[in-house]
Amino acid sequence: METRRMGQTGLQVSSICLGGNTFGWTTDQAKSEEVLDAYVAAGGNFIDTADVYSRWAPGNTGGDSERVLGKWMKDRGNRGDVIIATKVGAPMGDKPNETGLSRHHIIASVEKSLKYLQTDYIDLYQSHRDDLITPVEETLRAYDDLVAQGKVRYIGASNFAAWRLTRNLWASDKNNYVRYETLQPLYNLYSREGYERELEPLILDQQIGVIPYSSLGSGFFSGKYRQGQPLPNTPRAQGVQRTYMNERGFKILAEVERIAEVHSATPSQVALAWLLARPGITAPIVSGTSAAHVQELVGSTELKLTQEDLSALNTVSDWQKK
């Protein structure tokens, strides 16, 4: 698997990022370790999680995915071989200071993440969502201190509007604070406008690495969702139905499947290969539920779409003509 530089940092990350959102939720410790081992064996080194994963599941309190990763890294003795990204800022409780990007919450949260991950540093610490209440200077100063202390190497943003990311970059430059080196936006063949309209020009100008989530439309581009057929028995099926299962979505999927057949590939591999061919993309995030599933997804890095393929996909998914 090829590697790409993460933003303006010196970190070289694999071109497919393994999402840890299922760890400790729909995949238990043993199954998660099977997925992680398969990913590393395929040449992967970049794993994304968050402190809030998977607080929404009955019996979970948050930090569940981080705990799974921590145990796996300790048992394998491979902390130095993998790049760990986690996030802070999502609600972790009902109290006012248990959410957001205040210094108080960031400092308290990083200590928990370090403990759960069983490590003394986090490679990429990301703001899970924007905080319109806390001054950006307070947030960035907290991150700057964590980097100076060696607890965090680099910082990133997720779910930020272009104008807010610009505001943060300006504050970092003005105050000589660390800056956001990566952006994690919703981006796939169906959901293009929110990223391409304003964020894409900004990240290309500022050389920010992009780590798209929902790269496969929550599984829609795997091809397991069909018109007139029962929904798959998955936690995300209802959301997929509301967002993607419409005339435009199935038209895009049909083109993906046509190209997949031409290349003897899977629809998932085509959708990921399209993302990898987009300018500025560092590593799409994918979630695997088995070793075989991970091997399929990583196989997208070997698929080289032609210019005709890319043009066809761009045309059928063109948000300016939808």
Image (cartoon, grey):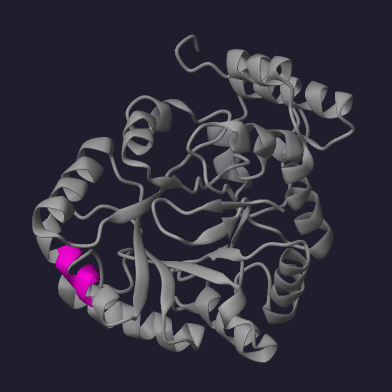
Snapshot quadrant of residue 155: bottom left
Image point (37%, 42%), residue name: 207
Query: In the displayed image of the protein, which residue is found farthest to the top?
Result: 321
Q: How far from the left and from the top, in percent, is residue 203?
A: 36, 38
Image point (67%, 51%), residue name: 2
Residue stretch rendered in magenta on the structure: 139-145
**Is 223 placed above or below 317 here?**
below
Magenta stretch holds residue 298? no
User: Could you say which is closer to the camera, residue 224 or residue 45?
Assistant: 45
Snapshot quadrant of residue 214: top right
**Is 176 placed above or below 274 here?**
below
User: Could you say which is closer to the camera, residue 147 or residue 193?
Assistant: 147
The main secondary structure of the magenta stretch is helix
The answer, for residue 132, to whether it is visible in the render is no
Q: How far from the left and from the top, in percent, is residue 273?
A: 68, 36
The answer, for residue 303, to whether it is visible in the render is yes
**Is 322 placed above or below 128 here?**
above
Q: How far from the left and from the top, in percent, is residue 99?
A: 25, 68
Image point (82%, 29%), residue name: 260
Q: How far from the left and from the top, in percent, is residue 44?
A: 68, 62
Q: How many marks?
A: 0
Image point (17%, 73%), residue name: 103
Looking at the image, residue 57 sits to the left or right of residue 234; the answer is left
Looking at the image, residue 93 sits to the left or right of residue 167; the answer is right
